[in-house]
Image (cartoon, coloured by chain):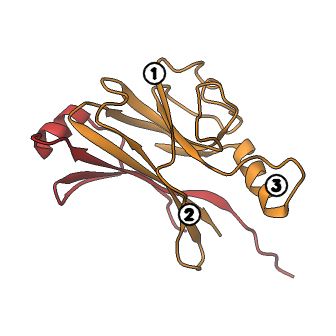
Chain colours: A red, B orange
Amino acid sequence: MKAHEPRVQVEEVSSVLTPAPGVSVEQALADANISGADKIEIEGGNIVVTWYRRRKA
Amino acid sequence: MANVNMTAGLKMVGDRASGVAGAANAIAGMSVDDNTTFTNTDNDCADTGGSPTNFQGNALDSTPTGGAAATPYVVSHLMTLTAAQYNTFVVKRIGLHNSATPTRTSTTLMFGIDGLSLTKAATFSLVTTFKLSYS
């Protein structure tokens, strides 16, 4: 007999930084002074930061 | 970088799923603050490290949404910090709460991550997505 072992987990936490009108992506990125992120990307004028992603076995 | 499943959060999920009498409210808010770490026995954001110097708790932008009916089943929670909120302060922890008005000491903390660093400024708004998976 094998039982299913249900789990509740944090799957992923990410943030999108949208520069204010008239502010460049580069300025926003510099102001944010980000560290501890798993990944940082620039997409469509926004900064996408992946803080945590569950590592799949 | 670490994710923390608070004991209180797991209890809340279990109670609501099984209809246990007195089950806590559903997840409804998110917070950011500048304390360094969470511990899985935390009940509020003033437990590990004491009361944060800077704290912002907001309601979720909208009702959480579920992904495809697959394993794992993923539910997404979004919260916006406007360009005017939490400025000059450093985000070091993000917490998920069962209240739309979380405070430093409200015993509403369910899940969280720590070990990050982002200085919030007036030059950008910030939308954070916190995903939980059920498998």
Q: Is residue B68 left or right of residue A31?
A: right
* Kind of residue at badge 2: Val
**The residue tagged with tag 3: helix, strand or loop?**
helix
Q: Residue furthest bottom?
A: A1
Question: How far, Cα to Cα, is label 2 from label 1?
Answer: 28 Å
Disc 3: which residue: B15
**At 66% across and 29% down in the image, what residue appears?**
B106
Q: Are marks 1 and 3 on the same chain?
A: yes
Which of these two is toward me, B73 or B121? B121
Give the image quarter of residue A35.
Answer: top left
| Chain holding disc 1 | B
**The residue tagged with tag 1: helix, strand or loop?**
loop
**At 78% across and 49% down in the image, what residue appears?**
B11
| Chain holding disc 3 | B
Pointer 1 with pointer 3, Cβ within 8 A: no
Disc 2: which residue: B75
* Kind of residue at badge 1: Asn
User: Measured along the vertical axis of the image, is residue A55 above or below residue B45?
Assistant: below
x%, y% of residue B121? Answer: 26, 30
Question: How far, Cα to Cα, is label 1 from label 3?
Answer: 32 Å
Which of these two is toward me, B76 or B40? B76
The residue carrying pointer 1 sits among few (fewer than 14), some (14 to 19) or many (20 or more) residues within 10 Å by Cα, namely: some
**The residue tagged with tag 2: helix, strand or loop?**
strand
Q: Is residue B28 left or right of residue A5?
A: left
Disc 1: which residue: B54
